[in-house]
Image (spheres, rainbow, N blue to C red):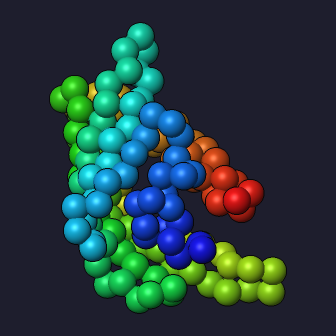
Amino acid sequence: MLWLALTNPDSINRHLPKDAKVKSIDETEFELSLKVKAGFIRPTVKAKSTLHDVRMNESFEFDLAGKALGTSVKARARVVLEEVEFGFLVRLSGDVETKGALNRVSDERKQQSITRFLDDYFQSVENS
């Protein structure tokens, strides 16, 4: 079930906020859309993601690229599932590059936002 919550759009969508959606283009390519709060406006950010080096139920890497309102984000990450006594640990490591208005946001604030999103996502997965 955890593997599906990381790689299957139908499973992923069950755990995302209502204003976010993942759509499959093919087996390894996905489109993502997310409304973000940016002051008094709420633009929809669109991104494409590609999975590669997939080892079923063990690990995968992904690339992500998206933009909205003159801002762009590129990311490359590796996800590893590690079985432990009480279940699984998900190890996520990677790099994120931003351009445009996002460069005015501190790395600490970006990290906090990403961490909060992931915490909420995995809490939803655990509760299902």
Residue drawn at point x = 50 percent, y = 87 percent: 58
**Location of residue 99 (image quadrant):** top left
Question: Residue 119's spot in the image, x, y percent?
Answer: 64, 52
Question: Residue 107's spot in the image, x, y percent?
Answer: 45, 42
Question: Residue 41's spot in the image, x, y percent?
Answer: 37, 15
* 67 sits to left or right of 8: left
* 31 sits to left or right of 87: left
Residue 22 appears in the picture as rendered:
yes
Residue drawn at point x = 29 percent, y = 78 percent: 52
**Location of residue 101 (image quadrant):** top left
* 65 sits to left or right of 95: left
View extreme (right): residue: 86
Residue drawn at point x = 74 percent, y = 86 percent: 84
Quadrant in which the C terminus appears? bottom right
Residue drawn at point x = 31 percent, y = 30 percent: 44
Question: Residue 121's spot in the image, x, y percent?
Answer: 59, 52
Q: Compared to 39, does 76 lie above or below?
A: below
Q: Compared to 28, does 59 lie above or below?
A: below
